Amino acid sequence: MDSECTLFHVESVEMKSHQRVLAQWNAFYKPEEGQFYIAAPAAISASGKQSLVSLLELAESLECTTAWMYVDRQRPDFVAVVSTFKYLGFQLSQTTVKDPKANKMYALLRYELD
């Protein structure tokens, strides 16, 4: 990362059909920009919603006005994941972010914090 940031990690575990589903949420805060970014987890579970809410509350407590969710555009469930976050109040941005080191493109979804 180019500038200083604070990293956050939240996990939620859920049993689904006798299998353990782990949702790992990673986020980072860039204080000089007042920006809060959340990575869409590889697995999304019902209990993971509370983890997302906790991260959004954290962003709000840091006085951010916007939280950004970034989603790997090459994930096989990309459309379903974006639809899920749109249902939760995120708006798909036309901006994409390229990570040349990982050879990935990310879509950004914006969430307005009150």
Image: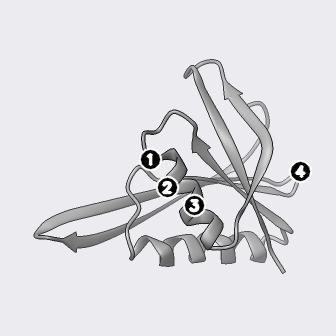
| Residue 85 locus on image (x, y percent) | 60, 64
Q: Are marks 3 and 2 in contact (CB under 8 Å)?
A: yes
109 on left or right of 31: left
Q: Mark 2 points at which residue?
A: 80
Q: Distance between the residues labelled 1 and 4?
A: 31 Å
Q: Are marks 4 and 3 in contact (CB under 8 Å)?
A: no
95 on left or right of 41: right
Q: Is mark 3 on a helix, strand or loop?
A: helix
Q: What element carries label 4?
A: loop
Q: Name the residue under label 1.
A: 77
Visible residue check, residue 74? yes
Q: Name the residue under label 3.
A: 83
66 on left or right of 103: right
Please tell me which of labels 2 and 4 falls first in the chain: 4
Q: Do the residues labelled 2 and 1 touch (CB within 8 Å)?
A: yes
Q: Distance between the residues labelled 3 and 1?
A: 10 Å
What's the amino acid at mark 3?
Answer: Ser
Q: Residue 33: which disc?
A: 4
Q: Residue 1: which disc?
A: none
Q: Is mark 2 on a helix, strand or loop?
A: helix
Q: Looking at the picture, does residue 62 appear above or below residue 100? A: below
111 on left or right of 25: right
Please tell me which of labels 3 and 1 falls first in the chain: 1
| Residue 21 locus on image (x, y percent) | 26, 63
Q: Would you identify the image quadrant in which residue 104 lies?
A: top right
Visible residue check, residue 26? no
